């Protein structure tokens, strides 16, 4: 692997946090554990209170994944639309939790549902963040055959974020999926090219490619534990940074 130079923790002005839907299940195997959503909200609130502009993308894998439904015979595009609706449910739950902790928020959806959330309009989203609101981008890219990882890379590029933080079930990128291969080794830093060339499936290839084109650093970390987002923002704990080679 090419080893990019690891520099001290940068200071961020605006970041996007992607939370996997699975992370919201807590110790369950489906749906949402309110205590887990609350713990993530407290962590996001702490980061927002430092003055960093924060936007969020939450996956839907705790409720519905189009690709899994297609494997059982469902039409893929129809399943993907259902998956995107699952991300809206998660976004509304996170909004509720953040607001209970005093954080002003807006949910913006890529699929219009104006009774419950604003439609996604790039310049409005930027304005919300400038005013100190946490913006939650829901319904992914709005298109089937994509994932919320790609939605996260897309929105982070549009918002000109300094980095995309992927909060997931594992504490970084490994040589193989550590949940299936306990002997896999973890990397501190990787290049986009390494991730793509070695099929390191922590994020889908479309998301990595989009980040690479936009020179958007990706930081992969474990979303569980004591305020992990706050810690990784300070450069503490275990995580993997994915950047360009130079
Ligand atoms: N090389 C690897 N390094 C680290 N994790 C990997 C790797 N290959 C596969 N994975 C798996 O990828 C998962 C990250 O994807 P995640 O569960 O966050 O999915 P998602 O699609 O972003 O979210 P959702 O749960 O909403 O579908 C990790 O939990 C890990 O098990
Ligand atoms: O742009 C998008 C984003 C998501 N989907 C569908 O939603 C589910 C849940 O998202 P995850 O990224 O897996 O958490 C996904 O499996 C797709 O079915 C989509 O179609 N387009």
Image (cartoon, rainbow, N blue to C red):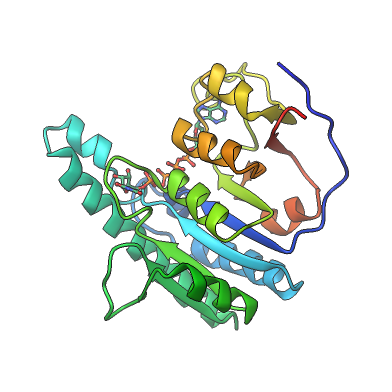
Specify the farthest residue to the right.
Answer: 8
Up the image or down, 2 lies above or below 55; here it is above
Between residues 174 and 27, which one lies in front from this camera angle? 174
Residue at position x 31%, y 78% in the image: 116
Place residue 14 in its image quadrant.
bottom right
Q: Position of residue 118 (x, y in %)?
A: 37, 76
Q: Position of residue 224 (x, y in %)?
A: 60, 50
Up the image or down, 82 lies above or below 244; here it is below
Looking at the figure, which quarter contains the C terminus? top right
Please state if 194 lies on the left or on the right of 199 as rendered.
Answer: right
Up the image or down, 22 lies above or below 180; here it is below
Please state if 13 lies on the left or on the right of 156 as rendered.
Answer: right
Between residues 8 and 235, which one lies in front from this camera angle? 8
Looking at the figure, which quarter contains the N terminus? top right
Whether residue 225 is visible = no
| Number of marks drawn | 0
Up the image or down, 205 lies above or below 136; here it is above
Residue at position x 67%, y 20% in the image: 185
Residue at position x 70%, y 70% in the image: 46
Residue at position x 60%, y 36% in the image: 212
Please state if 141 lies on the left or on the right of 134 as rendered.
Answer: left
Whether residue 189 is visible = yes
Q: Position of residue 82 (x, y in %)?
A: 22, 53
Q: Position of residue 61 (x, y in %)?
A: 36, 46
Between residues 125 and 99, which one lies in front from this camera angle? 125
């Amino acid at each position: 692997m090419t080893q990019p130079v690891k520099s001290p923790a940068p200071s961020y002005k605006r970041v996007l946090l992607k939370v996997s839907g699975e992370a919201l299940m807590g110790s369950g195997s489906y749906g949402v554990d309110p205590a887990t959503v609350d713990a993530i909200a407290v962590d996001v609130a702490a980061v927002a209170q430092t003055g960093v502009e924060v936007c969020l993308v939450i996956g839907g894998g705790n409720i519905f994944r189009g690709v899994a439904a297609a494997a059982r015979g469902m039409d893929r595009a129809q399943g993907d639309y259902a998956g995107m609706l699952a991300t809206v449910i998660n976004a509304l739950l996170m909004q509720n939790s953040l607001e209970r902790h005093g954080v002003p928020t807006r949910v913006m959806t890529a699929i219009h549902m104006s009774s419950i959330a604003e439609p996604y309009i790039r310049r409005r989203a930027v304005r919300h963040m400038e005013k100190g609101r946490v913006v939650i981008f829901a319904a992914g890219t709005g298109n089937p055959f994509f994932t919320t990882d790609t939605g996260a890379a897309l929105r982070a590029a549009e918002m000109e974020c300094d980095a995309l933080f992927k909060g997931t079930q594992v504490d970084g990128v490994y040589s193989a999926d550590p949940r299936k291969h306990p002997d896999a080794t973890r990397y501190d830093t990787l290049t986009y090219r390494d991730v793509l060339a070695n099929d390191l499936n922590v994020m889908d290839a479309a998301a990595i490619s989009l980040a690479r084109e936009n020179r958007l650093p990706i930081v992969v970390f474990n979303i569980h534990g004591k305020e992990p987002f706050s810690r990784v923002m300070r450069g503490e704990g275990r995580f993997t940074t994915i950047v360009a080679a130079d």
